[in-house]
Amino acid sequence: MNDIAPTKTYAFLLIPGFSTLGFSCALEALSLANHHPSGRKFYRWRLMSEAGAPVEAYNGVKISVDSALAPLERGETLIVCAGENAGRSSSKTVLNWLRREARRGGDIGALSSGTYILALAGLIGGKRVTTHWEYRTALAEMLPDVIMEDSIFSVDGRVFTSAGGAASMDMMLHRLRDDYGSDLATWVADQMVYTVPRVHSDAQRLSLKSRPEVRNPKLLMAMQVMENNIEDPLTPDEIADVVGLSTRQLERLFAKYLTISPKRHYLRIRLEKGRNLLRQTDLSVTDVCVACGFKSLSHFSKSYRANYGIPPGMEATDGKVLWSDRA
């Protein structure tokens, strides 16, 4: 354990609609560190909101804060905690404050959709970042200048981002280890009854490709090819050629392991992307149609209704837009 490093200071900026799980996991890691048998106070922290008022999380819980937006201390680390309504909850006051404080040179982090708020402030252009998997499609579509990683947390220079949820715990254990060594991080993990902390490159969820029954490497390769070619879909023949199979062999693989045809699986993942964009952004149905590789709006609408029971135009954002270029 590093006995020389001074006490580290954190500021948590709570954005209305933030996730209590991600926030509490991050804060608890710091709190537990201060209960180490050594008696040292490794961390100090404070909570902020735009005007200093309590902030309501997405689940209705209100958290009191220590102050309104205020200058950060020298060496203080900032973490932006967000969730639903990230774009609409980010005022010009908040974004200007973030830009000003970023110039102080301290570390800046984000939990869940807090990544998008950093993007709105112009702080992560060209950076490797992550966010919650549910928001990833929208963020990648609307912010092409960021390098979106499918990982539980990401670190690029002074910027660190987390998928939120329990991944906040993994990210903070990583920071504890960097700050004071592995002994303290391991002790905190034990206190959390967290026996197998994850590394940043771990996937966020057990996707279809992670299931034990899906083990064929050719099948996994075909699925990845589809996911990498959403806006300009390939034909079954082209996919089969990429993975080194005949079209018939590809169809048999999908039938055996997924009980579905390659064409149907491809359609599902394109529609899933469309649904995420419609729910999380203010993109028009036409724009979403193009982003998902459909040549005609009527084909997109028909396929969407067949899968989800409603036309895409009814997948209206009922005030819960997560990503908006009007923020």
Image (cartoon, rainbow, N blue to C red):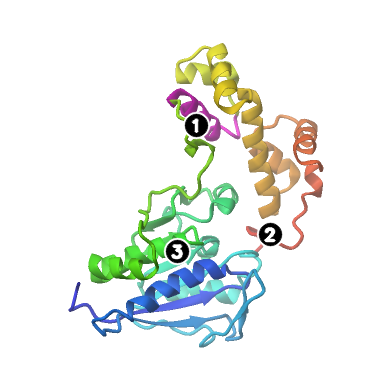
Q: Residues within 10 Å of mark 1 (few under 14, many from 20)?
A: few
Question: Dominant secondary structure of the magenta stretch?
Answer: helix
* Front in this rendered view, residue 46 or 325: 46
Determine if the magenta segment contains residue 98: no
The tag earlier along the polypeptide, 2 or 3, is: 3
Q: Position of residue 68 (x, y in %)?
A: 54, 85
Q: x, y (%) of residue 263?
A: 64, 24
Q: Quadrant of residue 62?
A: bottom right
Residue drawn where x is 51% and y is 56% of the image: 131
* Kind of residue sitting beneath label 3: Ser
Front residue of 98 and 217: 217
* x, y percent for residue 148: 47, 49
The numbered dot on residue 168 is 3
Q: Nearer the viewer, mark 1 or mark 3?
A: 1
Label located before the other in sequence (1 or 2): 1
Which residue position is annotated with label 1?
Answer: 213
The residue lying toward the viewer, choosing from 9 and 192, is 192
Q: CA distance from mark 1 to mark 3?
A: 30 Å
Residue at horizontal 57 percent and vertical 12 percent from the top? 248
State the SS at label 3: helix
Q: Is residue 226 above or below residue 172?
A: above
Q: How dense is the environment of label 2, judged by Cα within 10 Å: few (below 14), some, or many (20 and up)?
A: many
Callout 3 environment at 10 Å: few (<14), some (14 to 19), or many (20+)? many
Side of 166 where 34 appears, left or right: left
Q: Which residues are magenta?
A: 217-232
**Looking at the image, residue 125 lies above or below residue 33:** above
Of 79 and 105, which appears nearest the observer? Answer: 79
